Image (tube, rainbow, N blue to C red):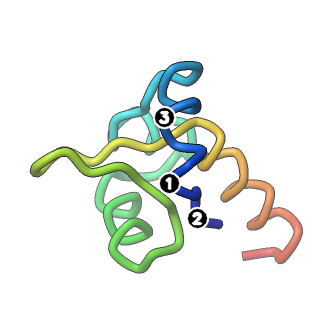
Amino acid sequence: MTTSRTDLPAQLLTNRLLTVQQTADHLQCCTKTVRRLVRAGELPHVRRGRHIRILPDDLARYVAACRSTGR
């Protein structure tokens, strides 16, 4: 579920990055859960300093993977 570095610039131009709070709102969970998913490597992310951002496409792939595996 990782994004290749060559795809990243094009995705950043076409997708608006989500904050941890926005990602938590989409998943209907708390921000701590999103941070745990990022730390565990289950949810790909972009980090700029201390700030974590999630590409909408990565969030959609994560949700699809959870749906198909029943996590």
Residue closest to the far left: 49
Residue at 81% in and 74% down: 70
**Which quarter of the figure is the N terminus placed in?**
bottom right
Q: Which mark is residue 48?
A: none
Residue at 58% in and 64% down: 2
Nearest to the eye among marks 2 and 3: give it: 3
Residue at 41% in and 80% down: 40
Residue 43 in the image: x percent, y percent? 51, 63
Residue wearing tag 3: 9
Residue 29 in the image: x percent, y percent? 47, 51
Secondary structure at badge 2 equals loop
Q: Which mark is residue 5?
A: 1
Residue at 36% in and 49% down: 46
Q: CA distance from mark 1 to mark 3?
A: 8 Å
Residue wearing tag 2: 2
Residue 20 in the image: x percent, y percent? 34, 43
User: Number of numbered discs present?
Assistant: 3
- Type of amino acid at the residue the image marks with label 2: Thr
